[in-house]
Amino acid sequence: MSTREELLGRARELRPLLAQHAAETETSGRIRPEVIDAVREAGLLRMTVPRRFGGYQLPFRTVVEVCAAVAEGCGSTGWITGFANTGKWMASLWSAQAQEEIFGVGPDAIHAGTSKPTTDVTRVDGGYRISGTFPSMSGLPYATWAGLFLLIPGESPAMAEALVHADELTVENTWDVAGLRGTGSETAVAKDVFVPEQRVIDVTRLQTSDFHQYPTPYKDEALYRAAVHPVLALAVAITPVGLARGALDLAVEGAGRKPLSGTTYQLQRDSVSFSNAIADAAMLADSAMLHMYRAADDLDSFAERAEVMDPVTRARVRADTGWAVKSATACVDQIINAVGSGAFATASPYQRMWRDVNIAARHGAASYLLNRELYGKALLGADTSFNRLAV
């Protein structure tokens, strides 16, 4: 089995390849096949897969480190790597029968998902028939499995998730945004797709964040005892943190060979103001990662102890991810302010990182504003039901 050090080393070795294709990934709206293949061959898509199915079953701290290292080279590829692992972790909470089917295709398959539900669901013998549109499904063009949220009329609880084969869906190219363009977060269209009973799960059992309620019978596997919504927030925050570290590395590398525009400094590193800005940026990047470490360590430690994470700690993990995203965004801003307007040249990787980090930062699961409110209300014992993702 690959170790943390091996996987982190492989992720860092991929950075030149990722950076080489990052501009094309953005303009084409797709990650090149050789990049996806390289990520797969490095074993980076099986970190959260149970060992029973050839996975590594590694703690969330390792997932954070490795996926952030991928995002340092390409935000879109980092996003897909993080969400593919999160999707597989979610699939590992399902019944034994469902897991056998899902992971039977191999541990390296990519899982795509979205949170917008459809109500066009009909119960039939052995399962359901589903129709509807599912927008912003990250990783859809690369996926083997797609998670579709359902509101099932006449059933209680009505909220469910169905896992379907991605090739049973039609892809509509609707992902036209300012950043993270290569994530392929397109719209999936289902037309009378049959889903067997074992691949439909009661979402309320997951929303409790009580692992005793998860359908998986393998309660001895610590990784799959973690609280669901904090894990989803962690997945969103990984890419901004990686982008901040990538931008910082670029700035440090360039400071010894580039002049500082608008000054007589022949090298950026000779400027006190530039040096101070880079120091501030580095502290922001470190703050972002340290909060991610605390969030991941909380998830790992509660799961390892077989304890259900209490609501205040769950809210704090969400707040950690929001703070990490805020710090990462501020880090990239600080670097671009120091580098100057040239950072916004189309040929500059800075402008792509700036757009990617700002798009990722607006995802509701790791929103600084929403998660700060959630944590404050949890600390005060106030109602937190305003947040659709709960805690």
Image: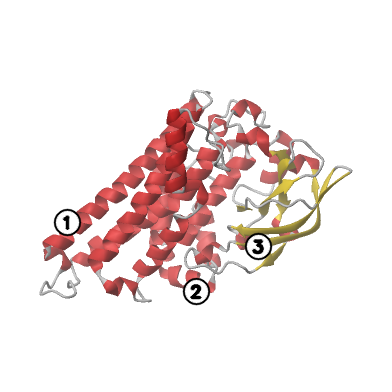
User: Which residue position holds label 1?
Assistant: 276
Q: How far is the residue under mark 3 from the one under mark 1?
A: 44 Å
**Side of 137 where 166 appears, left or right:** right
User: Which residue position holds label 2?
Assistant: 27
| Whether residue 327 can be seen here | yes
Q: Secondary structure at mark 2?
A: helix
Q: Secondary structure at mark 3?
A: strand
Q: Nearer the viewer, residue 63 or 157?
A: 157
Q: Nearer the viewer, residue 320 or 253?
A: 320
Residue 33 place in picture, x, y as percent: 55, 66
Near mark 1 (Cα within 10 A), the count class, few <14, some 14-19 or many ≥20, is few
Residue 105 place in picture, x, y as percent: 68, 49
Q: Amino acid at mark 1?
A: Asn
In this rendering, the answer to whether 272 lies above or below 88 is below
Q: Amino acid at mark 2?
A: Thr
Q: Nearer the viewer, residue 81 or 16?
A: 81
> Residue visible at 38% across and 76% down?
346
Q: How far is the residue under mark 1 from the one under mark 2?
A: 34 Å
Residue 251 place in picture, x, y as percent: 26, 63
